């Protein structure tokens, strides 16, 4: 079971490395890693379990954040919305994206960053993605809004990119041209 002690924090070199592609069929260890990443997110969103194990709540986590430099991440968005999202993605990629941008007006947080970093993080508003499931099935889907932001945040982790790399240095709240901001969530 993944605990916060297993989550590496900014400054660790693994967070700045390009993670390695996985090959199919996945090893038992790689399948387990995918399941553990998903279990962490589910536990972290459960009030009792997050308290019991002192987990910080997250909706996405990537393997490099547990010091496994592999191209795999989990996303789990609470299904109080009309559009729940929950999957593990192996060797994910963005095949096309909108010109229009988006960002969370409240900024982004990250399980590997123990401080508040203010500022807008410009993201593609809509993306078409491809990835493989743990069973080696290829998936293609279109994501928008918070789901698209989340996918891009986790894909960045596989490329050694942190969310604050995208924040305008001279003015963190500079207007993002051609964007539809997402207020809250
Ligand atoms: C408790 C139980 C306000 C501040 C609003 C909390 C269950 C921030 C937003 C959660 C912010 C759950 C989140 C992310 C932001 C902020 C991630 C609360 C957990 C909202 C997830 C990866 C960016 C993802 C919208 C600095 C750990 N998550 N909020 N960003 N939630 N959560 N990110 N932004 N300002 N980070 O953090 O999982 S993509 Cl579900
Ligand atoms: Ni992160």
Image (tube, rainbow, N blue to C red):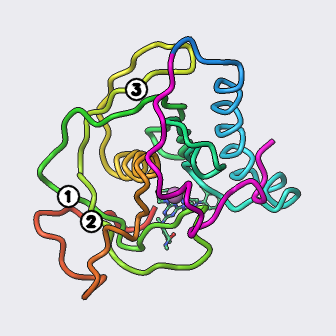
Q: Is residue 173 left or right of residue 85?
A: left
Q: Which residues are magenta?
A: 1-23
Q: Residue at x 23, y 32 (%)?
A: 95
At label 2, counting other C-alpha atoms closer than 10 Å, the crowd grade (few under 14, some 14-19, many 20 or more) is some
Q: What is the distance, in whole Å, between disc 1 and disc 3 at their CAs? A: 22 Å
Is residue 181 placed above or below 23 in the rendered structure? below
Is residue 163 placed above or below 168 in the rendered structure? above
**Which mark is on residue 181?**
2
Residue marked by disc 3: 131
The answer to the question of whether label 1 and label 3 lie on touching residues, with beta carbons closer than 8 A, is no
Q: Does dot 3 land on a helix, a strand or a loop?
A: strand
Where is residue 1? Give x, y as percent.
81, 41
Q: Sequence order check: which comes first, mark 3 or mark 2? A: 3
Q: Sequence order check: which comes first, mark 1 or mark 3? A: 1
Q: Hey, which quadrant is residue 155 in on the image?
A: top left
* Nearer to us: label 3 or label 2: 3
Is the magenta region chiefly helix, strand or loop? loop
Residue marked by disc 1: 101
Q: Hey, which quadrant is residue 167 in on the image?
A: bottom left
């Amino acid at each position: 079971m993944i605990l916060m002690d297993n989550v590496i924090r900014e400054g660790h070199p693994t967070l700045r490395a390009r993670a390695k592609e996985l090959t199919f069929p996945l090893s038992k260890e790689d399948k387990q890693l995918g399941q553990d990443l998903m279990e962490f997110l589910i536990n972290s969103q459960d009030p009792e379990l997050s308290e019991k194990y002192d987990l910080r709540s997250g909706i996405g986590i990537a393997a490099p954040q547990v010091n496994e430099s592999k191209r795999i991440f989990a996303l789990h968005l609470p299904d109080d919305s009309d559009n729940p999202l929950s999957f593990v993605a192996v060797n994910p990629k963005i095949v096309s994206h909108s010109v229009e941008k988006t960002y969370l007006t409240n900024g982004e947080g990250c399980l590997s960053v123990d401080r508040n970093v203010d500022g807008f993080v410009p993201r593609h508003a809509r993306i078409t993605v491809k990835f493989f499931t743990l069973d080696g099935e290829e998936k293609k889907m279109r994501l928008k809004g918070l789901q698209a932001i989340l996918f891009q945040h986790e894909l960045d982790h596989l490329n050694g990119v942190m969310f604050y790399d995208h924040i305008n240095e001279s003015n963190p709240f500079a207007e993002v041209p051609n964007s539809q901001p997402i207020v809250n969530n």
